Amino acid sequence: MDIFTQKKWLIRSLVFLAILNISSISFVVWNRLSENRDNRHRKDKEVIVIADLLKKELNLTETQTHQLEKIRTDFFEKEQVLAQEIREKRDSMNMIMFNQDTNDTLIQLLAKSVADGEYQMELLRFQQAQSLKEICTMEQKKNFQYLVIEIRDYFRPEKRK
């Protein structure tokens, strides 16, 4: 095989590998984007399912239903912001933990900040529950406490054996 034939073969191989690499990267990016889109749709469906379930089981009026939807939308928006902040702090903490020059004090501060974020999330859930209780009648409140457990169990992933 002469040098020119080898060169052509090498160039063709490089072009093929580059196309294969670009295709693989495109597939991974497309797959991640579709997963994010599916997660958003799943969350939206969960919100709709919960709202419909509460409307049906608690016999909510139209006014109560609109108030419920507003409360849940407000909560969801605030929850997204807090969850993103917590995720970013955890990512920072992980990067620092596995860095060659680990700063223990900074990791502890970030861990406290993550815990504070989780605490804020729980307070937000409490505020949402308080707001939901305010729009319900006494009879609806009694039914609501049992529905909360059912809803929680419905959306909890099954335990793996």
Image (cartoon, grey):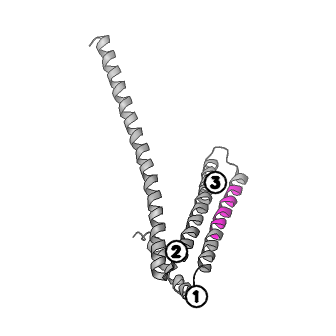
The residue at the far left in this view is 1
The image's mark for residue 89 is 3
Whole-angstrom CA distance, mark 3 to mark 1, is 41 Å
Secondary structure beneath label 3: helix
Residue segment shown in magenta: 108-122
Mark positioned earlier in the residue sequence (2 or 1): 2
Whole-angstrom CA distance, mark 2 to mark 1, is 16 Å
Q: Eyeballing the image, is 155 above or below 30?
A: below
Whole-angstrom CA distance, mark 3 to mark 2, is 36 Å
Queried whether the magenta region covers residue 118, the answer comes back as yes
Q: Eyeballing the image, is 28 above or below 50?
A: above
Q: Can you tell which of label 2 and label 1 is closer to the viewer? A: 2
The residue labelled by disc 2 is 65
Secondary structure beneath label 1: helix
98 relative to 13 in the view: left or right:
right
Mark positioned earlier in the residue sequence (3 or 2): 2
